[in-house]
Amino acid sequence: MGILETFSTNMRHYRRQAHLTQEQLAERCGLHRTYIGGIEQLRINVSLKNVEKIADALEIEPSLLFVEEHEQPPRP
């Protein structure tokens, strides 16, 4: 799995785990819903600045968004 696909998969996973819609996550990040959707659909190459915003909104460490599923430590 490539880095963009890993990021997209993890962002979707943590968003759903937090019971957030794309729109709710976008609001928390100060981004547009179509931007969040574009990331999840692998149409947008997310910037590092926005990686930080997304991680903050999901209340996780940014590095967790780049770890492939089989390598992820259990979430506290």
Image (tube, rainbow, N blue to C red):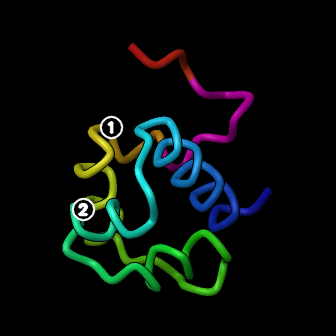
Query: Which of the 4 quarters of the picture holds residue 33?
Result: bottom left
Q: Where does the image place residue 69, in percent across and percent down from the top left?
A: 69, 35
| Residue ID at (59%, 41%) | 67
Which residues, given as a range, are shown in magenta? 65-72
The amino acid type, in three-letter code, at marker 2 is Lys
Q: Of callouts 1 and 2, which one flags the residue occurring earlier in the amino acid sequence?
A: 2
The amino acid type, in three-letter code, at marker 1 is Ile
Secondary structure, mark 2, is helix
23 left or right of 13 in image = left
Query: Which of the 4 quarters of the picture holds residue 38?
Result: bottom right
Q: Name the residue under label 2.
A: 53
Badge 1 vs badge 2, beta-carbon distance below 8 Å: no
**Rounded to the nearest whole Å, what is the CA distance between mark 1 and mark 2?**
10 Å
Compared to 71, does 11 lie above or below? Answer: below
Q: Which of 76 and 62 is in front in this view?
A: 76
Q: Where does the image place residue 12, in percent across and percent down from the top left?
A: 57, 53
Q: Mark 1 points at which residue?
A: 60
Q: State the quadrant of the N terminus.
A: bottom right
Q: Where does the image place residue 35, in percent across and percent down from the top left?
A: 44, 83
51 left or right of 70 in image = left
